[in-house]
Image (cartoon, grey):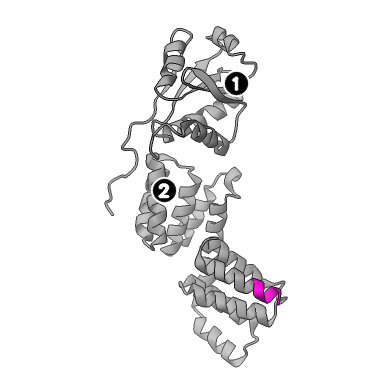
Amino acid sequence: MPSESLIGGAAAAPVKDVTAANFMAEVVDGSFDAPVIVDFWAPWCGPCKQLGPILEKTVRAANGAVRMVKLNIDENPEIAQQMRIQSIPAVYAFKDGRPVDGFVGALPESQVKQFVQRLSRGTGAGPSPVEEALAMAKQAQQSGDHASAGALYSQILQREPENVEALAGLARATIAGGELAKAKQLLDRVPKESAKNAEITAARSALDLAEQAQKAMASAKKLRDRLEGNPDDHEARLELATALFGSGEREAAVSELLTLFRRDREWNEQAARKQLVKFFEVMGPADPLTLSGRRRLSSIMFS
């Protein structure tokens, strides 16, 4: 894969300051060409300072599908009065010369993205460079090309340092490369509000398993010998399953845990089932091995 940057080729969507003098031209008339988001703000408004950068980043990531303007209500009170703005931050979206959507207050980034996506649907604009890079990185990772995936995720993070999907993806790529300390540093950068994001949770599980596997793989032969001498050595079977998963032998790892669960489902507070759930989380809900493993687990549980 070429090393040159694949992100940022298109021009960023403009974000302008407007006044009462050019509001009609920039917002009302301009919205016939593309949807225009108006951010009503004031210098004294704390939540405005939180929302503004999130809104700008999201609009720029839309790759020209929408435009954005900012209007200081202290300097342009007549516009705020005409729009009946009672509290700020207030955000209105104009399309074809009239307001079509809006919200009041500082929303989290996920909801701001949904707002912009609703507005940009049907505009004919393609995916943003970041979205295209994320799709390419996912495809590379799924095909086992972790180096290319890592390079793409790194490029995305240079542009959007807190892009949760890219942080999780780069962490997974570094785990695949055996750089567990680097993966831990990446996951430590995740904002608190995104800690429970499904991709972050899966990346953390992958790191936990890799750390466990690293310890277990060194003694894999001893673990097999222990099991040969005593098939009910549950601790050895659990460690062996973890080592197998860490070395890429996922199917064998799942089978060992299913065997352990079948032999003693309550051992160590259902440790076999809990580790299986962690395996499924790391592989993803649509992975064929996750689907077959869940079916096999259910058949044992309800037999």
Q: Which residues are magenta?
A: 298-303
Say which of 70 and 121 sits in front.
121
Q: Is residue 165 visible?
A: yes
Magenta segment's dominant SS is helix
Say which of 246 and 70 sits in front.
70
Q: Residues within 10 Å of mark 1 (few under 14, many from 20)?
A: few
**Which residue has dot 1 on it?**
45
Depth check, mark 1 against mark 2: the one in front is 2
Magenta run includes residue 203: no
Image x and y of residue 102, in percent: 57, 25
- Helix, strand or loop at label 1? It is loop
Taking 239 as reference, is 74 above or below it?
above
Image x and y of residue 171, in percent: 47, 55
The answer to whether residue 251 is left or right of residue 274 is left
Q: Earlier in the sequence, mark 1 or mark 2?
A: 1
Taking 83 as reference, is 146 above or below it?
below
- Helix, strand or loop at label 2? It is helix
Q: Residue at x 56, y 29 (%)?
A: 50
Q: CA distance from mark 1 to mark 2?
A: 35 Å
The answer to whether residue 183 is left or right of residue 260 is left
**Which residue has dot 2 on it?**
134
Q: Residue at x 49, y 35 (%)?
A: 117
Q: Residue at x 52, y 27 (%)?
A: 52
| Number of numbered tags placed on the structure image | 2
Image x and y of residue 67, in percent: 43, 25
Point out the image quarter for the N terminus: bottom left
Point out the image quarter for the C terminus: bottom right
The image quarter in which residue 146 lies: bottom left
The answer to whether residue 23 is left or right of residue 279 is left
Q: Residues within 10 Å of mark 2 (few under 14, many from 20)?
A: many
